[in-house]
Amino acid sequence: MRTSYTEEDKYIRAKKKVDNLKGFYYNLLSYCLVIPFLIFINLMTAPNYLWFWWPMFGWGIGIAFHAFGVFNHKIGLGKDWEEKKIREFMDNDKNKF
């Protein structure tokens, strides 16, 4: 069964996706800035024990789950893949004739 969305519904859904994507990129940027700083602190204060691996690993797992939550529709053949492909082929055929 196919659901029709109003333009406002489409806008709200698109805005939510953009907000999720922006949140992921902010998380990734924070990771890329903080982890090197933690490595520096670790190596300057206690080079015999490399504790920076723990936050790097933990936060990295969090980023991986965040990425999966944001990009899951693009990994493999997600739930909307078939419908998107059908629309794409229909649009291509429409443009040919």
Image: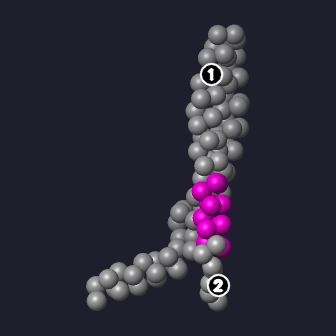
Segment tinted magenta in the rendering: 9-20
x%, y% of residue 16?
A: 66, 60
> From mark 1 to mark 2, how far is it between C-alphas?
49 Å
Position of the N terminus, as image quadrant, is: bottom right
Residue for point 64% across, 54% down: 19
Q: Residue most toward the left?
A: 96
Residue for point 35% across, 81% down: 92
Query: Above or below — where is 87 with respect to 10?
Result: below
x%, y% of residue 7?
A: 60, 75
How crowded pointer 2 is (Cα within 10 Å; few <14, some 14-19, many 20+) is rated as: few
The residue carrying mark 2 is 3
Rendering quarter of residue 26 = top right
Residue for point 66% across, 32% down: 56
Element class at badge 2: loop
Query: Above or below — where is 49 with respect to 65?
Result: above
Labels 1, 2: front one: 2
x%, y% of residue 89?
A: 40, 81
| Kind of residue sitting beneath label 2 | Thr
| Kind of residue sitting beneath label 1 | Phe
The mark found on residue 68 in the picture is none
Is 47 magenta? The answer is: no
Q: Residue most toward the top?
A: 45
The residue carrying mark 1 is 37
Is 17 magenta? The answer is: yes
Residue for point 50% across, 76% down: 84
The answer to whether the residue labelled 1 contacts the one labelled 2, judged by CB atoms less than 8 Å apart, is: no
